[in-house]
Image (spheres, rainbow, N blue to C red):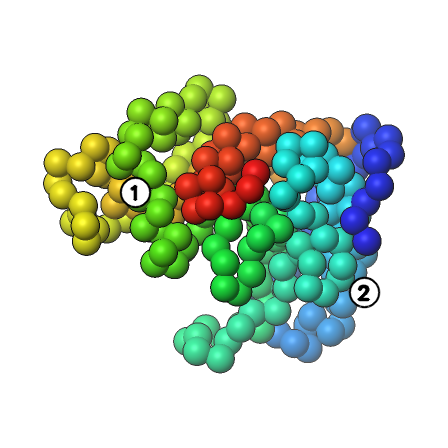
Amino acid sequence: MIGEDRPIAGKTYFTPALFAFLRELKDNNTREWFDAHKARYECVAKAPMLDFIDDVGPLLRRISPQLLADSRASGGSMLRIHRDVRFAKDKSPYKTALAAQFRHQACSKDIDAPGLYLHLEPDQIMIGGGLYHPRGESLYKVRCAIAAKPELWQRIIEEPRLSERFAQSGDKLRRPPTGFAVTTPLIEEVKRKDFVALAALDEATVCGADFLAEFERHARMLAPLLAYLSRAIGLAW
């Protein structure tokens, strides 16, 4: 169920016990260990994250009605703790991070769409947003939008609220993509394969009573980027 509007100021979701659990999981990444500590996982990781997702929903809807916060235990915004090891050399069965993604409602297995991301891992805590690994048509549309109006893209990524707090991340081509020349405006931006911005946080912030407000503050910083990417690929914002 997506959360209803209600007062949530000063509410603590995550505690140091979450990060202690994740550190121990990293050192004991086996099904036997996890099964023996599953109740602990439910208490310090899963339940708090679902509670957070439930409460963040109304805040995200104020930023854009397109952003979804789905607090279902399975198939919602919280990412699975289980790793897909079918084609991996590392057969460790569990992720050592707790994470959630808040997708644009148009996002599906057939449609690329931007969104927000929360990653909680000892020594690697991040809030991010953007468009990660878009497929051919969507990627081409964003590149064309940047090349057509480079000043608009530059204004968004250089806006101080974003650029002073977030760093651009993701893969980039070495050479201009097909259809674009070396002389294309902002060619280094056009070469990007991902259009993502990330900001680091610390455990004290995540475990504080103001973390929900802090997450909303960061989401608002990312909103112009998400709006641009949505419109570039033909989605509502």
Q: Is residue 157 left or right of residue 20?
A: left
Disc 1 residue type (three-letter): Cys
Residue 31 marker: none
Q: Position of residue 192 (x, y in %)?
A: 30, 46
Quarter-of-image position of residue 219: top right
For the residue pair 171 and 93, the one nearer the viewer reads as: 171
Q: Residue at x 73, y 42 (%)?
A: 57
Residue 39 marker: 2
Callout 1: few (<14), some (14-19), or many (20+) C-alpha neighbours within 10 Å? Answer: some
Quarter-of-image position of residue 116: top right
Disc 2 residue type (three-letter): Ala
Report whether residue 155 is seen. Answer: yes
| Chain-order first, disc 1 or disc 2 | 2
Q: Residue at x 43, y 46 (%)?
A: 233
* CA distance for labels 1 and 2: 50 Å
Residue sticking out furthest to the top: 160
Q: Residue at x 28, y 48 (%)?
A: 172
Query: Dot 1 corresponds to which residue?
Result: 144
For the residue pair 148 and 114, the one nearer the viewer reads as: 148
